[in-house]
């Protein structure tokens, strides 16, 4: 069975941060809410445990997503540099030799 075309896989990988961005925001909001509830004395130690666990998960997800985005950016820059510095074909050089000369 064949997977999707390479441009479709790249498109899906590039959208990870867009998809998980709201999840990160919700996680941070939940951590702040749990910390506030713990500071106000509502199930103090349980809320601290929830805040630490959720904060750790949000941090790990953020590190993974930004590492992935950085590696994607580096790969695209390498590809761009490779394409820009590619030597011209011999047919291009031959065409430039036959260009009209100045009088």
Image (spheres, helix red, strand yellow):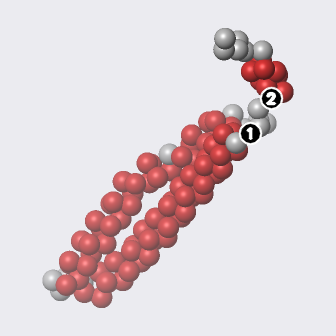
In the foreground, 88 or 79: 88
Q: Determine whether 64 is above or below 47 in the image.
A: above
Callout 2 secondary element: loop
Which residue corresponds to mark 1? 86
Q: Residue at x 19, y 84 (%)?
A: 39
Which quadrant of the figure contains the N terminus? top right
- Check disc 2 and report the residue beneath it: 89
Considering every residue shown, the one lying at the far front of the view is: 103
Q: Residue at x 40, y 54 (%)?
A: 21
| 29 up-or-down from 103: above or below | below
What kind of element bears circle 1? Answer: loop
Quadrant location of residue 4? top right
In this orientation, does residue 37 appear?
A: yes
Task: Say how many tags the image has.
Answer: 2
Identify which residue, 101 or 24, lies in the foreground: 101
The x, y position of residue 77, in whole percent, is: 60, 49
Label 1, label 2: how far apart the Cα atoms are? 9 Å
Q: Are marks 1 and 2 in contact (CB under 8 Å)?
A: no
């Amino acid at each position: 069975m064949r997977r999707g075309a390479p441009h479709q896989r790249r498109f899906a990988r590039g959208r990870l941060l867009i998809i998980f961005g709201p999840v990160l925001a919700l996680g941070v909001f939940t951590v702040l809410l749990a910390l506030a509830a713990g500071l106000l004395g509502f199930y103090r130690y349980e809320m601290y445990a929830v805040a630490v666990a959720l904060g750790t998960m949000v941090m790990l997800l953020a590190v993974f997503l930004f590492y992935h985005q950085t590696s994607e950016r580096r790969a695209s820059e390498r590809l761009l540099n490779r394409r820009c510095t590619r030597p011209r074909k011999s047919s291009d050089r031959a065409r430039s030799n036959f260009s009209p000369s100045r009088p």
